[in-house]
Amino acid sequence: MKHSVTQEDNEFGRQIERCEFPVADFDHRAHVRLAYIYLVQADSARAAVDLMRSALVGLLRHAGVDPSGKYHETLTEAWVLAVDHFMNKTESSNSADEFIDQNPLLLDSGIMQSHYSAELLFSDEARRKFVEPNREPIPRY
């Protein structure tokens, strides 16, 4: 495998799954890191999306936050697909941090606006279920 995770990456993922990671500290970089970890561990992008959804919704519920008001299905899946795309373009990485350092464009949280109009991306439909981009497609592998 050309991408791998460290013990620290695995522990980060476990902290989120056990709801031990502070929601307030779960920033965009943490989302990208978790997507990378799940893509390394899962057998497909679809499986990684399912793991992300479960982890994020669980973390929100544990923190007393209603997932229907905070969780966004399209953003979750689109970011997993974006990370997958960059993983396919990157020769190798030994950790999530190394991968992110090699692909700093992933830290631009506004990148999805090159794929989606704001109207579509921030619609109720996009929050509830994945919607395909209405601008540039997200590459799939």
Image: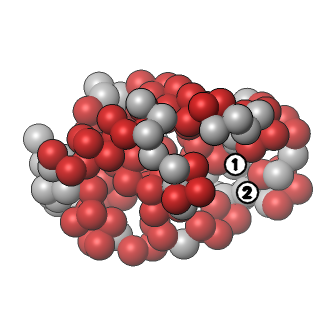
**Viewer-proximal residue, 94 or 56?**
56
Residue count near mark 2 (Cα–Cα under 10 Å), binned few <14, some 14–19, many ≥20:
some
Residue plotted at (19% across, 56% down)? 95
For residue 111, which quarter of the picture? bottom right
Left or right: residue 98 compared with residue 138: left
Residue count near mark 1 (Cα–Cα under 10 Å), binned few <14, some 14–19, many ≥20:
some
Q: What percent of the width, then of the height, locates residue 106? A: 46, 66
The relative height of residue 105 versus residue 138 in the rendered view (above or below) is below
Q: Which residue position is annotated with label 1?
A: 133
Tell me the tag on residue 116: 2
Circle 2: residue type: Tyr
Tell me the tag on residue 86: none
Circle 1: residue type: Pro
Q: What percent of the width, then of the height, locates residue 30? A: 45, 56
Left or right: residue 114 compared with residue 141: right
Viewport quadrant of the N terminus: top left
Residue plotted at (78% across, 51% down)? 121
Q: What percent of the width, then of the height, locates residue 109? A: 59, 67
Residue plotted at (45% across, 46% down)? 21
